Image (cartoon, rainbow, N blue to C red):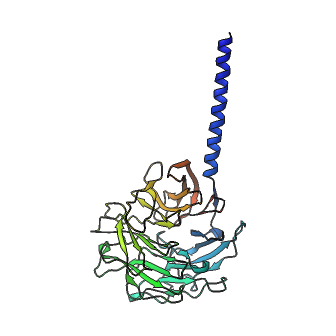
Amino acid sequence: MRYPRFIFRLTVLISLVALFTFSELRSTSAESGKVTLVRTPSGGIQPQALMDEGGVLHLIYFTGDPAAGDVFYVRRESGKTEFSSPVRVNSQPGSVVAGGTVRGAQMALGKNGRVHVAWFGSQKSEPRGPDGSAPMVYARLDDSRKAFEPQRNLMQFSGGLDGGGSVAADRAGNVYVVWHGRGEKQGESHRRVWVSRSTDDGKSFTREAAAYKEETGACGCCGMRAFADERGDLYLMYRAATEMINRGMFLLVSRDQGKSFRGVSLDQWRLTTCPMSTVSISRGEPVPMAAWENDGQVSYAPLDASLEQKVQPITAPGGTGKRKHPVISGNARGETALVWTEGTGWKRGGSLSWQIFDHNGRPVGDVGTAPGIAVWSFASVVAERSGQFTIIY
């Protein structure tokens, strides 16, 4: 009788140890993967959030008619939970386009934390681009930090704006507004990426110039992203359209303040039509990270300014099919939050999904989900000082 009793006690002890260990692992995973979900203020769509070095969260969002609406700016001070009163970014009412999801406003933080915003101008936006086309518009927060300066069109001659543009800024006062537009010949395979540069914190800009000598094309109704890192290196990501069927992501890097660029293809996607995709780049540890879509799946990868290292994308777990509009953020612990939409499309909303990865790129916990992505919208994510992630959607 003593032997079975010993076996029974040992079995109970092993079970308790296993249960305790599992609980600890589950608790650690939950803590590492904890996120806070926040709805965009005022029922807005297309939130774009950035966290500055002082812990202040900066946010822009769109409201109104998707063909001719407005962008507003709010901020949340460090340690607070409420956003400030909204300030309209565009000085001309109804001068921003959000339709198609890829054409919304984008934001960057520059010298002394100044906010810079660029967007696809609507039919109400003046002045127009070349031959009356849609303009590429820019505005920056004024010196009082309480209002935005009057908006300006930076497109002087290129024309053909379609998928929207982007903006980047660095600590030294360099600001870059970029877009893809018409090339020397008609067609997506001849489209070029154009760059307008400022060296005085957005007070003045150069006439736009083609960023890259080689012809990669640019997928007409796909978005692009610009990002300047802490060293001042400038990254531009967009979907190519070489020969009208090679639509993989393409990366341009400038290490001389936008004067010249080197380029590399990041992946392959043979497709005859535009997938209406977007791309995200954010600050990472120790290098910037990018997230993008390929054939219904979303991935992320660190970027190498030297272009010497082959990009090795880390893919979100689970099935593929309708994953779009990925955004990304990393915290001080080396963890990464990859956030995307499920089931969104033309004039169709969907749901929100996210996955946390550890410093080795391994998934932590399960994929999180929530309903409520509005038509033409997506999500944004920032890492809090605590290491937790805030998702705004």
Name which quarter of the figure residue 251 lies in: bottom left
- Residue 315 seen anywhere in this rendered image of the structure: yes
Against 225, is 155 above or below?
below
Frontmost residue, 276 versus 58: 58
Please tell me which residue is depicted at 50% across the width and 52% down the height of the picture. 360
- Quadrant of the image containing the N terminus: top right
Q: Position of residue 23 (x, y in %)?
A: 65, 39
Please tell me which residue is depicted at 43% across the width and 60% down the height of the picture. 293
Q: Position of residue 130 (x, y in %)?
A: 39, 88
Against 56, is 361 above or below?
above
Q: Position of residue 31 (x, y in %)?
A: 64, 50
Total marks placed: 0
Q: Is residue 352 left or right of residue 322?
A: right
Q: Position of residue 235 (x, y in %)?
A: 44, 72
- Residue 121 seen anywhere in this rendered image of the structure: no
Frontmost residue, 372 versus 34: 34
Q: Residue furthest top?
A: 1
Frontmost residue, 335 versus 57: 335
Q: Is residue 189 left or right of residue 304?
A: left
- Quadrant of the image containing the C terminus: bottom right
